Image: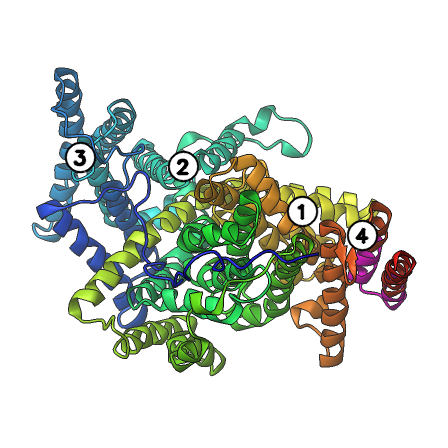
C-alpha cells in the first residue's frame, strides 16, 4: 500500500511545538474574577493551599478539625469561582429584578443571622467565659438550613450571567459553608461522640443536612449530574431500606441519626476526604508548580521529538504525552483538553479520521491515571483504604500501566499501517538533541520517585518534588519568582476544588454503604455467584465497577467501587491488592465506556465529531485494556507479586496476547490485512495468551502461527 504524503509535503513546513499546553483553561461555568473581589479570592486560594502545606509539613492540625476546615474552604472557594450554570462571558451585567430583591433580602438575612449567631457563640465561650444562651444554636441551625436551601434554589432560577462578579446566592452559600464549619468546630468534642447515635438532636441534624446540601450542589457544578444522581439513589436507599426485598433490606434510620453519621469519619470526613486533604491537595499543587514552570509543555515537546516522525506520529505523541500529563493532573477529561487541543488536529492532518483522533486521545488520557508514581489520585485512596504502602502500590502499577499503553500504541500503529499513514516531517518537529539537553526538567519526577523509595513519607517526597519544580524553573525562561509561586499556590486550589467536592460527595456514598451494610450484602452475593463460576463473579464485579463509575471522576468512581465491589472480591479469595487494582482499573476505564464517557465527550468537542460515536471509538482503542484486570486474577505476577522469572514470563506472554487482540480488532497482522475468520482465530489466540497458563500459551502461539502461515500462503499464491 502506498503511504500517504507527509503533512508537510504540500506546503512550507510549519513548526510544531507545545506552547501553553500546561495552562488550565477556565471551565464553562468558572468565573474570571477581577478587581478587589478577584484579589481577595486569589489570596484566599493562596492561603488555602499554604495552610495545607503548613499543616502537612510543619504543624499538624487535629484530624477532624483539619478535614472540616478542608471541606469548608473548598466550598467557599468553589462557590466563589464556580457558577451554577454555564456563563455567558460576553453578556453585560443585568440589574436585579424586584423579585430577586424580594428573594435576596430574606435569604441573606437568614444566613447572616446564622453567621452572627455562631460568631456570638464563639465570642461568648472563648472571650467572655460563658456558654451562649440555650435558644441560640437551634435558631442558628433553622435559619442556616432555610437560607441555604433558598439560596441554592435562587441560583438555579436566576442564573448568573456575569463572569467577573460573584452571584448574590453564591455569596450566601459561601457564608453558609463557613457557618457549618464554625458550628462543627464549636461542638467538636460532643460531635465526635454523639454524631450518628440516638443522642443527637434536631440542631445537629439541620447543620449536617446543610453541609450535605452544600457539598452536593458544588459537586453538581464541577462534575455534572451523574455523581449527584448516584448519590441521591444511595440517600434514598438509606431511608427506603425497610421496604425493599432481599439483600437490599435494612431496618432504616432516623433523619437525625443518618445525616449526622454521614458527617463523621465514616462518611464525608472519612477516607476520601482524608486523601483529598493530604495527598490530593499536595500533588495537585505539585502539578500546578509543574505547569507554572512549563514542564508540561516540555513533556509534550519531548514526545513530539521522540515519536513525531513515526508512522501515525501525532497519535503516538498523544499516547506518550497524555500518559505523562495524565499522571500528574488526575482527571481524564482535563488531560484530553490539555494535550488534545494540540494532538487531535495533528492526527487529523496525517490521515486519522476525526473520530479516531478523538478516541485515541481519550483512551491515552484516561490511561495516564494508572501511570506510577502519581497515578492521578486513586492510588492514594487505595493506600488509605487498604493500608498497603503507597510505594508497593506504585510498583504494582508498573506492568499494568505498561500493558495499557502498549495496547493503545499497538492499536494506533496497526491502524496507521492499515491506512498507509506516515509521520510528520523532521523540520516540523522539535529537535530531539535539544530536548535531551533539557532532560533535567524531568528532575521533579525523578526526585519524587527517588525520595519515595528512599523511605521518605509520601507527603515529604511530594513537598520536595514541588520545591524542585520551582528550582528547575530557574534554568528555563519561565523562572518562578514570588509572583509565580503565589500563582502556582492559587492554581493549586483552583485545580483541587473539583476533586475536593467529588471526594466529599463520594464520602456521602461511602457513609451510606458503611451504615446500611450494603457492601457486605453485595460481597455475600458475589460469594454465591463465585460458587457457580469465579470468572462470572469477576465479570459481574467489572460491570458494577464500570456502572458505578460512569459519568464520575476517577477518584469518586474508585472510592465507591472500593466500598461496594472490592470487599466482595476479597471474600471470594482474591488478595486485597489484586481486588483493589481490579476495581481501580475499571473505575479509570469508565471514562471511555459508553454511553457516559467523559473523556470521549471531551475529545469529541475538540475533534468536532459526534460525542457518542467518539466515545465508542475510544472504547475500541482501549478495548485490549479491558482484559488486563482479568490477567491480575490469573497471573498475580503482573502486579510484581512473584519471582523475577515469573514476572518476566507473564509480562512477555501478556504483551503478545495484547498484540494479538489489537491485531484482531484492527484487522491487521504482521504481513498485512486479515479476513474475518483470521480475526476470530487471532481473538481466540489472544484470550489464550492472556489466560496465563503454559498450555493456553502454547495454544495461543500455535493459533497465531497458523494465521501467519495462512497469510504467507495467500501472498505466495497471489505472487
Q: Which residue is mark 4?
A: 674
Q: Quadrant of residue 311?
A: bottom right
- Element at label 1: helix
| Mark with earlier residue (3, 4) | 3
Q: Which residue is mark 2?
A: 259
Image: magenta residue range: 683-700
Where's residue 507, x and y in %? 45, 46
| Mark with earlier residue (2, 4) | 2
Q: Is residue 277 visible?
A: yes
Q: Looking at the image, is 356 positioned above or below residue 319?
A: above
Mark sitting on residue 114: 3
- Element at label 3: helix
- Element at label 4: loop
- Element at label 2: helix
Disc 3 to disc 1: CB gap under 8 Å:
no
Mark 3 or mark 4: which is in front? 4
Q: For the N terminus, which image quadrant?
A: bottom right
Q: Which residue is mark 1?
A: 542
| Mark with earlier residue (2, 1) | 2
Where's residue 303, x and y in %? 48, 67
Disc 2 to disc 4: CB gap under 8 Å:
no
Circle 2: is it few (<14), some (14-19), or many (20+) Cα within 10 Å? many
Where's residue 405, x and y in %? 60, 62
Q: Is residue 145 left or right of residue 560?
A: left
Where's residue 544, x and y in %? 64, 42
Image point 87% across, 62% down: which residue?
Answer: 712
Amino acid at each position: 500500500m502506498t503511504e500517504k504524503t507527509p503533512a508537510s509535503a504540500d506546503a512550507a513546513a510549519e513548526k510544531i511545538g507545545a506552547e501553553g499546553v500546561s495552562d488550565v483553561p477556565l471551565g464553562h461555568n468558572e468565573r474570571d474574577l477581577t478587581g478587589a473581589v478577584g484579589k481577595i479570592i486569589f489570596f484566599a486560594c493562596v492561603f488555602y493551599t499554604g495552610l495545607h502545606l503548613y499543616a502537612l509539613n510543619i504543624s499538624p492540625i487535629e484530624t477532624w478539625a483539619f478535614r472540616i476546615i478542608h471541606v469548608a474552604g473548598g466550598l467557599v472557594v468553589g462557590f466563589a469561582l464556580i457558577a451554577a450554570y454555564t456563563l455567558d462571558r460576553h453578556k453585560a451585567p443585568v440589574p436585579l429584578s424586584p423579585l430577586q430583591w424580594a428573594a435576596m433580602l430574606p435569604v441573606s438575612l437568614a444566613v447572616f443571622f446564622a453567621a452572627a449567631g455562631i460568631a456570638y457563640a464563639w465570642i461568648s465561650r472563648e472571650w467572655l467565659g460563658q456558654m451562649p444562651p440555650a435558644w441560640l444554636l437551634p435558631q442558628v441551625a433553622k435559619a442556616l438550613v432555610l437560607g441555604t436551601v433558598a439560596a441554592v434554589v435562587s441560583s438555579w432560577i436566576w442564573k448568573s450571567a456575569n463572569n467577573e462578579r460573584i452571584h448574590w446566592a453564591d455569596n450566601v452559600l459561601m457564608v453558609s459553608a463557613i457557618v457549618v464549619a464554625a458550628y462543627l468546630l464549636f461542638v467538636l468534642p460532643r460531635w465526635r461522640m454523639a454524631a450518628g447515635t440516638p443522642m443527637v438532636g434536631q440542631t445537629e441534624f439541620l447543620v449536617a443536612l446543610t453541609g450535605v446540601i452544600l457539598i452536593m450542589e458544588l459537586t453538581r457544578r464541577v462534575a455534572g449530574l451523574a455523581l449527584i444522581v448516584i448519590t441521591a439513589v444511595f440517600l434514598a436507599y438509606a431511608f427506603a431500606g425497610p421496604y425493599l426485598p432481599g439483600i437490599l433490606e435494612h431496618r432504616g434510620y432516623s433523619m437525625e441519626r443518618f445525616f449526622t453519621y454521614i458527617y463523621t469519619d465514616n462518611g464525608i470526613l472519612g477516607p476520601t476526604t482524608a486523601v483529598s486533604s493530604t495527598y490530593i491537595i499536595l500533588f495537585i499543587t505539585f502539578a500546578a508548580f509543574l505547569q507554572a514552570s512549563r514542564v508540561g509543555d516540555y513533556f509534550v515537546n519531548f514526545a513530539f521529538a521522540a515519536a513525531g516522525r513515526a508512522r501515525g506520529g501525532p497519535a503516538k505523541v498523544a499516547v506518550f504525552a497524555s500518559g505523562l500529563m495524565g499522571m500528574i493532573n488526575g482527571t481524564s477529561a482535563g488531560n484530553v483538553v490539555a494535550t488534545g487541543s494540540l494532538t487531535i488536529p495533528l492526527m487529523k492532518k496525517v490521515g486519522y479520521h476525526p473520530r479516531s483522533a478523538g478516541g485515541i486521545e481519550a483512551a491515552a488520557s484516561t490511561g495516564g491515571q494508572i501511570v506510577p508514581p502519581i497515578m492521578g489520585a486513586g492510588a492514594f485512596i487505595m493506600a488509605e483504604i487498604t493500608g498497603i504502602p503507597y510505594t508497593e502500590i506504585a510498583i504494582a502499577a508498573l506492568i499494568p500501566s505498561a500493558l495499557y499503553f502498549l495496547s493503545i500504541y499497538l492499536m494506533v500503529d496497526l491502524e496507521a499501517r492499515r491506512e498507509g499513514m506516515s509521520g510528520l516531517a523532521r523540520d516540523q518537529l522539535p529537535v530531539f538533541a535539544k530536548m535531551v539537553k533539557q532532560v533535567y526538567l524531568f528532575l521533579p519526577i525523578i526526585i519524587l520517585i527517588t525520595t519515595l523509595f528512599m523511605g521518605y513519607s509520601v507527603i515529604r517526597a511530594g513537598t520536595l518534588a514541588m520545591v524542585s519544580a520551582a528550582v528547575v524553573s530557574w534554568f528555563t525562561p519561565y523562572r518562578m519568582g514570588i509572583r509565580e509561586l503565589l500563582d502556582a499556590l492559587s492554581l493549586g486550589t483552583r485545580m483541587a476544588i473539583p476533586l475536593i467536592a467529588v471526594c466529599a460527595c463520594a464520602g456521602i456514598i461511602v457513609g451510606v454503604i458503611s451504615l446500611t451494610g450494603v457492601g457486605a450484602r453485595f460481597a455475600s452475593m458475589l460469594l454465591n455467584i463465585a460458587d457457580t463460576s469465579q470468572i462470572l463473579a469477576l465479570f459481574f464485579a467489572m460491570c458494577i465497577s464500570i456502572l458505578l463509575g460512569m459519568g464520575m471522576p476517577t477518584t469518586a468512581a474508585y472510592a465507591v467501587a472500593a466500598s461496594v465491589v472490592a470487599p466482595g472480591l476479597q471474600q471470594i479469595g482474591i488478595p486485597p491488592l489484586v481486588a483493589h487494582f481490579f476495581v481501580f482499573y475499571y473505575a479509570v476505564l469508565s471514562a471511555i465506556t459508553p454511553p457516559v464517557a467523559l473523556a470521549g465527550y471531551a475529545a469529541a468537542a475538540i475533534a468536532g465529531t459526534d460525542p457518542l460515536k467518539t466515545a465508542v471509538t475510544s472504547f475500541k482503542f482501549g478495548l485490549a485494556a479491558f482484559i488486563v484486570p482479568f490477567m491480575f486474577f490469573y497471573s498475580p505476577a503482573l502486579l510484581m507479586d512473584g519471582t523475577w522469572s515469573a514476572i518476566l514470563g507473564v509480562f512477555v506472554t501478556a504483551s503478545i496476547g495484547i498484540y494479538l487482540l489489537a491485531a484482531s480488532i484492527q484487522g491487521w497482522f504482521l504481513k498485512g490485512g486479515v479476513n474475518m475468520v483470521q480475526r476470530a482465530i487471532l481473538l481466540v489466540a489472544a484470550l489464550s495468551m492472556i489466560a496465563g497458563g503454559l498450555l493456553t500459551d502454547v495454544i495461543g502461539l500455535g493459533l497465531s502461527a497458523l494465521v501467519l502461515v495462512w497469510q504467507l500462503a495467500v501472498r505466495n499464491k497471489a505472487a
